[in-house]
Every structure is written in structure tokens, then in C-alpha cells.
Amino acid sequence: MDRCWLQGTLGDALHAISCAAGYNLRWLLRAIARLGIEPVFLRLARAALSRACAIRRFTARSRAAIGRLLAGTMAAPTLASGVVLCR
């Protein structure tokens, strides 16, 4: 561990946790390289990132649609039968 530049006991605790997390990540990456499973790991990481981005885009669009609905600039969503879901 290098010198801790964070202030106080909370800074010391955060520094220790971040050092431990860095050590564990380096250990995990070395194990992945040693076992030769980079393609599998990269495929899983790419899938997880694309899902996270899709969720973020969906929630941003949903928030924007809810804002327009509440502002009265968008019609209320309806079912195929014509039943209004919300007013």
C-alpha cells in the first residue's frame, strides 16, 4: 500500500478497502489470463455492459415520457382495447 492521502479514519478505511479491491481485481485478471478464458470472460463482460446500457437508455426514455405525460404534452398510454392505462 502506498501513502494514504485521504483524511481521517474514514480516509484510512477507504484506502484499505480500495487497495484490497485493486489486489483482488489484479488476482482475478491474472487467473483469467493463466486459465486462458479471456474470450469467455470478454463475451460475458460485453453482454453485461450492453444490458446495463440498455437499462440506462430505457429508464432515461421512460423518465422523459413520464415527464411529457405529466406536463400534458403526450397522450396517456392505452391498451389495444382502448383502455387508458393512466390519466
Image (cartoon, rainbow, N blue to C red):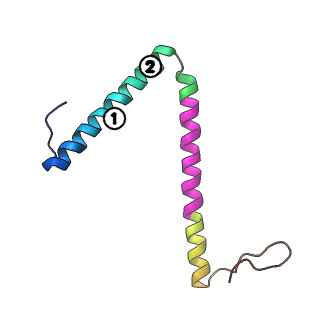
Farthest residue, direction right: 81
Residue 53's x, y, as percent? 55, 50
Q: Residue at x 16, y 32 (%)?
A: 2
Q: Position of residue 21 (x, y in %)?
A: 33, 35
Quarter of the image for residue 67 reads bottom right
Q: Who's the residue at 14% across and 43% down the image?
A: 5
Give the extent of the magenta segment.
Answer: 42-60
The residue labelled by disc 2 is 31
Q: Earlier in the sequence, mark 1 or mark 2?
A: 1
Specify the quadrant of the image occupied by residue 29: top left
| 74 is higher (above) or lower (below) than 42 | below
Left or right of residue 25: residue 50: right
Residue 34 vs 23, above or below: the answer is: above
Q: Is residue 37 left or right of residue 79?
A: left
Crowd class of label 2 (few under 14; some 14 to 19; many from 20; radius 10 Å): few
Provide residue 12's location: percent of width, then percent of height: 18, 43
User: Where does the C terminus fall, quadrant-wise?
Assistant: bottom right
Residue 33, position as x, y percentages in the image:
46, 18
Residue 7 seen in the current view: no
Residue 21 lies, with reference to residue 85, above or below; the image says above
Tell me the element at label 1.
helix
Kind of residue indicated by mark 2: Ala
Q: Quadrant of the N terminus?
A: top left
Residue 6 relative to residue 25: left or right: left
Q: Was residue 44 drawn as part of the magenta stretch in this picture?
A: yes
Residue 21: assigned label? 1
- Report if residue 59 lies within the magenta region: yes
Q: Main secondary structure of the magenta part?
A: helix
- The amino acid beneath tag 1 is Ala
**Picture residue at 57% right of the left edge, 33% below the top:** 44
